[in-house]
Amino acid sequence: MVKSKSNLWVALAAPLLLGIASCSKDDDGMPTDPQTQAKLSAVAVESGSSSSSSARVEVSGFAVSQFSVGTQDVDMKYYAEADLTAGISLGDLQLKSAVNAGLQSSSSSKKSVVLISNGESKFGVIGEGGTPEGNYTEVAFKLYKSTESNANDPMYQKSLLITGEINGKLAQVWTESEKSIRASSKSSTGVDVSENTEMVLQFELDKLFAGVNMGTALDANGDGRIEIGPNSPDGNAAILAKIESNLETAVSLNKR
């Protein structure tokens, strides 16, 4: 039987198409762009201050002593270094995802990281490993609600926890949602990642508490603690809603 022209074309073209597809990425699924070792961390600071500052953090009437956040499912977008050096304008460049790269895989695992301890900012490592060289414009991630630890862990059943003092009383702010957050670079060209770069998700507390007067938070049940969280016995629901709505605009991508 004689093959139809369409079937004959498919038979001849299939090996060529498979060859082209196999060149788009390595056999193990790793990106083919040249790679470097890099790290992703997070830090909490007051807007306009140095992210390495060791000064005690106070904002909106809240003296912060501890800040922890849960992260998972990280997705990094970048312009490949090879495309940038080829002279292609940013408007014509295609953003790529660092899917399957070691850094993104390491950063995507569920974890809780400490950003402020004993009133001082610190860098909490989210992940590290190989990643394509280029300019990174965005890191998206989801908050992670810790359910695998025990009830004695302060982060148990929480995705974000900030503790400190308000008007001399112990205070606690927490969330339980696993909302998605998109942290963009403050520079339109992104963060240049090459030669062991450390990218930083910077939580700016002034922006997180923008429009909030923590001095008005209530200790409604009179137990000596001010609690601001879902179904809190102290109420304070409006304050929590404002803080949660501020979250995405409070996080940006920077270079350490």
Image (cartoon, rainbow, N blue to C red):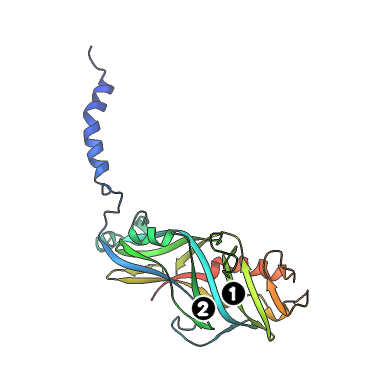
Residue 168 versus residue 30 in the image, above or below: below
Residue 167 versus residue 147 in the image, above or below: below
Q: Which mark is residue 41?
A: none
Q: CA distance from mark 1 to mark 2?
A: 9 Å
According to the picture, the residue beneath numbered tag 2 turns out to be 116
- Amino acid type of the residue tagged 2 in the rendering: Ile
Which secondary structure, mark 1? strand
In percent of the image, x 36 and y 69: which residue is there?
39
Q: Which mark is residue 162?
A: 1
Decide which of 70, 46 is in the foreground and name it.
Answer: 70
The x, y position of residue 221, in whole percent, is 78, 74
The x, y position of residue 96, in whole percent, is 36, 55
The x, y position of residue 150, in whole percent, is 57, 64
In percent of the image, x 24 and y 23: which residue is there?
8
In percent of the image, x 58 and y 65: which residue is there?
156
Say which quarter of the image contains residue 247: bottom right
Task: State the quadrant of the N terminus.
Answer: top left
Q: Residue furthest top?
A: 1
Decide which of 91, 169 is in the foreground and name it.
Answer: 169
Residue 170 falls left or right of residue 1? right
Residue 94 falls left or right of residue 233? left
Residue 152 versus residue 26 in the image, above or below: below
